Image (tube, helix red, strand yellow):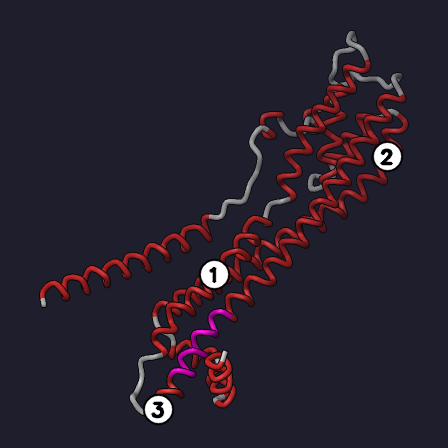
Amino acid sequence: MLALLSAAAWAFQDESFWTPWAIWQQSGWLSRLSAMMLAMMMLRSAIALGWRTFSNAKAQIQTRRFRCVAHPLIARGDLHGAIAAANAAPDSHVAFVIADGLRAFASWPLDLPHADAVEAARRAMVRSQNYMRARLRLGIGPLQNVAATAVFIGVGTTVLDIPNAFRGGCDRCTGFSLVAGGMAMSLYFTALGLSVAIPAMWFANHLIVRSERLDMEVSNAASELLSQLFAHPEIERKLAIPAETGGNAPTKKWGIPYDHQRSLLVPIVGFHFLVWTLLLIAFVAGLIDRISR
């Protein structure tokens, strides 16, 4: 605790110490690599947050429009019009699922019972909802990984830099100042890791809650559609669906989308490989030097 307070006091006495350029100049190669990695993580988090926020906002706007248009059409039994309204909202999470249910219901053979057609619509909406649930969570994985690893990168850089703080002069006052300055420099990277990890965790939790809310909207809309189909067996099932309203092929929902995080995985693996390789080389060189003596 005394060392931390001394480092903080030394840092505040020298106002130029906390300027980014001064810190960059006084940092070693390992600290600079860590800073660049943390900056890359911050940029990746900002991109994921912006893209996911824009996609959710766009989906909600189109969903409100689709709900106003499709609800009276389904109530009148105009499935063709409801499917066309869903195709006019390609980014709506609700329209995506409802359209697949209506297509499955409308294409069911007329000689089979009405309950079987409703069950086919339910299964189609379950498949689409699973696919849409995965789509709504895109972008959350990178934020969670950044929040989980940025702190440890900052702390690890601090731990590896602390031994350098004890390399100084022999004078008591001069040595204390050098140690305090070196420790303050090392603690900067812990603060940098926290500044990257805390917003990433907050935004990840925010997007998780948002995706759960959108998923509940889909569940409610699917449940309401099934209730209307059950309550109105007179709705005509067989109708000619034009090619432009055919929708997505079923095989497109077999593969579930997920976050490809190569932009984070490759640098982190390369950084750890470089660090461990250099440590191994230093250990072997020290061992050879000791044996030669």
Contact, CB < 8 Å: mark 1 with mark 3? no
Residue 52: give x, y in percent of width and height. Answer: 64, 51
Q: Is residue 164 left or right of residue 152?
A: left
Task: Identify which residue, 2 or 118, lies in the foreground.
Answer: 2
Residue 152 is labelled as: 1
Q: Nearer the viewer, mark 3 or mark 2?
A: 3
Cα distance between the residues tagged 1 and 2: 51 Å
Asked if the stretch drawn in magenta spans residue 253, the answer is no
**Residue at the image point whose x is 49% and y is 57% from the top:** 149
Tell me which segment is drawn in magenta: 179-190
Cα distance between the residues tagged 1 and 3: 33 Å
Q: Is residue 57 left or right of residue 281?
A: right
Q: Secondary structure at mark 3?
A: helix
Q: Which residue is mark 2?
A: 71
Residue 172 is labelled as: 3
Asked if the stretch drawn in magenta spans residue 185, the answer is yes
Q: Secondary structure at mark 2?
A: helix
Question: Which amino acid is tagged 2?
Answer: His
Residue 115 is labelled as: none
Q: Nearer the viewer, mark 1 or mark 3?
A: 3
* Magenta highlight: main SS: helix
Question: Which amino acid is tagged 3?
Answer: Arg
As displayed, is residue 180 above or below residue 108? below
**Residue at the image point whose x is 80% and y is 36% from the top:** 220
Residue 18: give x, y in percent of width and height. Answer: 49, 81
As displayed, is residue 127 above or below residue 218? above
